[in-house]
Image: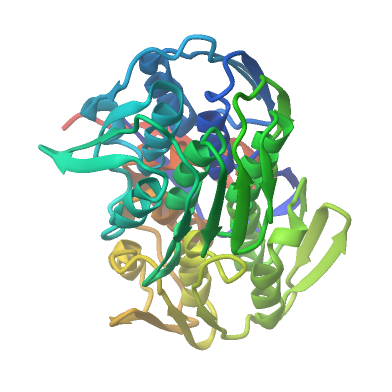
């Protein structure tokens, strides 16, 4: 086991390049298992989640190889239908193999997924989408058991009580592209992850209209062909480094930045008093004065992303005045709050809101990461905390940030990975 150790107080300066999108890569990996051939995915980050998805697909038949940021998927053979609990339990996005396996084999037995402990994430919308396409599905003994004798197009609305579901949209898409006839998905998720998945499928021969909108119209085709595709940049990683620059009072240029997918995030950063300069796919953030408080409401894309809520909570902790962040998607996504309090943050959770009375100096402490984005938030707090901070259980971080420690060190942070001491 390792921990990340940070000495706070260093202003970040320099340039950092954003890696490919983790969430989009996971969806496209599942999509790339539909053609009975070889697909090449570029700009794929080297992450634990990517490795896990590769292992799951490997059990089902496809062969995967990653060299650097290039991933090849040979899905000529897709023979199995059982995705075991031991692999599925570690990652929510593993649910994508449900749609992929149904599309290729006609039946699937997939363990209910796991992932970060950030609240209930029911799969009812996934099942609703699949049933609309003629799939018989039930849940027994912790497994989703599904079978379809004849995939047929259908019409379904996937808008749920907390908005549209990325996972349900992707799973429905994966079955619909190889189904007979037309499928209409209303209430489709509009996230860039879904757009990447749609764009890959279209490059492989699928017929899909409405990419990036809440209505997708799919005309089923008989088969798809292997193709090459380059992943979009990770907007959550980009946002994390911009928040790091804002918190430390430095000047950081973030390149390979998906600016068009980050309008809400950039708008909030400007409200904090930071100066932003956008040049193509690069954003330079500079802060020279005091931060200003802000209010944020998390919402499905194109709203403010839930995956940046924890990082902005850390920013609010050092911002003078009261900031309010309302979480509307995952009711349990506040586990980082207790750890930020250990560092001196004044934060209260009331219902779905985080109320932060900021401006106090944070102090270094030993803190425990509870999930992927909480890990990032605690590291950001450590960058500005007085003294030393040690972040434990960093395996969460390795699931979603490619070489975060190395990138922060290049920006001037005093940060390193250390082996945990045996007690």
Tell me which corner region of the image, top left, top right, bottom left or bottom right, holds residue 220.
Answer: top right
Residue 162 location (% of width, % of height): 39, 70
View extreme (left): residue: 141
Horizontally, residue 15 falls left or right of residue 243, namely: right
Residue 13 location (% of width, % of height): 74, 53
Query: Quadrant location of the C terminus?
Result: top left
Residue under the point 44% across and 61% down: 158
Tell me which corner region of the image, top left, top right, bottom left or bottom right, holds residue 418.
Answer: top left
Tell me which corner region of the image, top left, top right, bottom left or bottom right, holds residue 93.
Answer: top left
Front residue (pair 364, 271): 271
Residue under the point 39% across and 30% down: 102
View extreme (right): residue: 279
In the rendered view, tell whether residue 267 sits above or below residue 235. below
In the rendered view, tell whether residue 272 sits above or below residue 162. below
Front residue (pair 78, 177): 177
Residue under the point 29% across and 62% down: 335
Horizontally, residue 141 falls left or right of residue 191, namely: left
Q: Is residue 394 visible?
A: no
Query: Quadrant location of the N terminus?
Result: top left
Horizontally, residue 332 falls left or right of residue 414, namely: left
């Amino acid at each position: 086991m390792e921990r990340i150790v940070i000495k706070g107080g260093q202003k970040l300066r320099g340039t950092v390049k954003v890696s490919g999108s983790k969430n989009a890569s996971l969806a496209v990996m599942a999509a790339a298992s539909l053609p009975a051939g070889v697909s090449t995915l570029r700009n794929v980050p080297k992450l634990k989640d990517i490795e896990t998805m590769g292992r799951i697909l490997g059990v089902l038949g496809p062969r995967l190889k990653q060299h650097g940021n290039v991933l090849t998927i040979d899905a000529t053979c897709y023979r199995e239908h059982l995705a075991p609990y031991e692999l599925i339990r570690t990652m929510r996005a593993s649910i994508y193999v449900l749609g992929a396996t149904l599309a290729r084999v006609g039946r699937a037995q997939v363990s209910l997924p796991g992932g970060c402990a950030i609240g209930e994430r029911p799969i009812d919308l996934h099942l609703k989408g699949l049933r609309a396409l003629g799939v018989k599905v039930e849940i027994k003994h912790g497994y989703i058991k599904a079978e379809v004798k004849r995939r047929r197009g259908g019409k379904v609305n996937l808008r749920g009580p907390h908005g549209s579901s990325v996972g349900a949209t992707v799973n429905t898409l994966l079955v619909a592209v190889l189904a007979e006839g037309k499928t209409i998905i209303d209430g489709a998720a509009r996230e860039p992850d879904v757009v990447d998945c749609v764009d890959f499928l279209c490059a492989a021969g699928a017929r899909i209209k409405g990419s990036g909108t809440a209505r997708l119209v799919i005309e089923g085709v008989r088969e798809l062909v292997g193709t090459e595709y380059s992943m979009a940049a990770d907007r959550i990683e980009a946002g994390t480094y911009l928040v790091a620059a804002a918190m430390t009072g430095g000047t950081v240029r973030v390149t390979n930045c998906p600016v068009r997918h980050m309008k809400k995030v950039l708008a909030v950063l400007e409200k904090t008093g930071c100066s932003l300069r956008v040049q193509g796919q690069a954003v330079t953030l500079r802060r020279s004065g005091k931060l200003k408080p802000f209010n944020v409401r998390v919402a499905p894309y194109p709203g403010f992303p839930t995956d940046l809520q924890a990082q902005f909570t850390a920013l609010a902790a050092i911002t003078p005045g009261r900031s309010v962040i309302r979480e509307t998607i995952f009711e349990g996504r506040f586990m980082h709050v207790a750890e930020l309090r250990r560092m001196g943050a004044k934060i209260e959770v009331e219902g779905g809101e985080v109320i932060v009375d900021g401006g106090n100096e944070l102090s270094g402490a030993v803190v425990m990461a509870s999930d992927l984005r909480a890990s990032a938030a605690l590291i950001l707090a450590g960058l500005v905390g007085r003294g030393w901070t040690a972040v434990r259980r960093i395996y969460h971080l390795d699931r979603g940030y490619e070489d975060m420690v190395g990138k922060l060190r290049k920006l001037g942070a005093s940060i390193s990975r250390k082996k945990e001491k045996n007690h």
